[in-house]
Image (spheres, coloured by chain):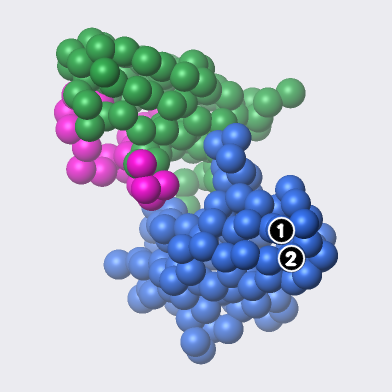
């Protein structure tokens, strides 16, 4: 079984500062993928970044980076230089290599203050 | 040019009615999904089709019936709507069903309110 845990229901950050959103996972699969999605107040789900379990380097996409620590089973999202438009719900998700299903965490609501 | 489009965006209806939500993707993907997001924002898979074949069928009341006329379309029909069906329903698609690097792209969601 796959499980995603996001322990921070809400986070606050000042504009232009960096913020880390926590995500831990549990799976028995050796091959798996980790994903982060953003859901702004308008409601759509936007794919942000992907990390494969066998990727040697941490994934980066613009201001987003994924701090992947395999031994600790964590896949934290780091947003650098926060902007007001980053205020949204952020979901961590995973899929095991043998599984069709994407399992989501409960999400973290990020608020960026001016 | 929207990649995954759902219609309608909002749906308000009475208990007991039957309604449908349509989804279309123009990404050329083989696999499509329906998710339900409840009032606490928790997202859960309901169904998935790969090239018109059902591959995921979670524990969902049989009042919910997905239909895939072709691999670019996956519609969701709901019979005898109940108050508990009120939620946001998301359609998504991905290039294939499995594999770890298989990004799912979501539609904008349909907010269903059952009165």
Instruction: Tell me which residue sits at (22%, 19%) in the image.
Output: B81
Q: Residue furthest bottom?
A: A71
Crowdedness of circle 2 by 10 Å Cα count: few (<14), some, many (20+)? some
Q: Colour of chain A?
A: blue
Q: Can the viewer see residue B31?
A: yes
Q: Can the viewer see residue A59?
A: no
**Position in image of residue A19 (x %, y %):** 68, 70
Disc 2: which residue? A14
Q: Colour of chain B?
A: green
Residue A79, picture quadrant? bottom right
Q: Marks 2/1: CA distance?
A: 5 Å
Instruction: Tell me which residue sits at (46%, 26%) in the image.
Output: B110
Q: Which mark is residue B68?
A: none
Residue B44 part of the magenta-drawn span: yes
Disc 1: which residue? A113
Residue A12 part of the magenta-drawn span: no
For the record, the magenta segment spans B39-64
């Amino acid at each position: 079984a796959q499980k995603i845990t996001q322990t921070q229901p809400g986070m606050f950050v000042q504009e232009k500062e960096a913020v880390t959103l926590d995500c831990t996972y549990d799976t028995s699969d050796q091959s798996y993928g980790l994903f982060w999605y953003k859901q702004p107040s308008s409601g759509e789900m936007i794919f942000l970044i992907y990390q494969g379990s066998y990727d040697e380097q941490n994934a980066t996409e613009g201001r987003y980076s994924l701090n992947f620590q395999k031994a600790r089973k964590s896949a934290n999202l780091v947003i650098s230089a926060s902007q007001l438009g980053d205020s949204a719900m952020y979901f961590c998700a995973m899929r095991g290599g043998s599984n069709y299903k994407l399992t989501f965490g409960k999400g973290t609501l990020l608020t960026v203050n001016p | 040019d929207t990649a995954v489009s759902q219609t309608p965006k909002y749906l308000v209806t009475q208990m007991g009615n039957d309604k449908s939500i349509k989804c279309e993707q123009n990404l050329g993907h083989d696999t499509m999904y329906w998710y339900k997001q409840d009032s606490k924002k928790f997202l859960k898979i309901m169904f998935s089709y790969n090239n018109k074949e059902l591959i995921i069928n979670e524990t969902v009341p049989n009042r919910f019936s997905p239909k895939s006329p072709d691999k670019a379309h996956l519609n969701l029909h709901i019979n005898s709507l109940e108050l508990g069906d009120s939620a946001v329903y998301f359609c998504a698609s991905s290039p294939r069903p499995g594999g770890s690097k298989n990004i799912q792209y979501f539609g904008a969601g349909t907010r269903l309110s059952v009165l």
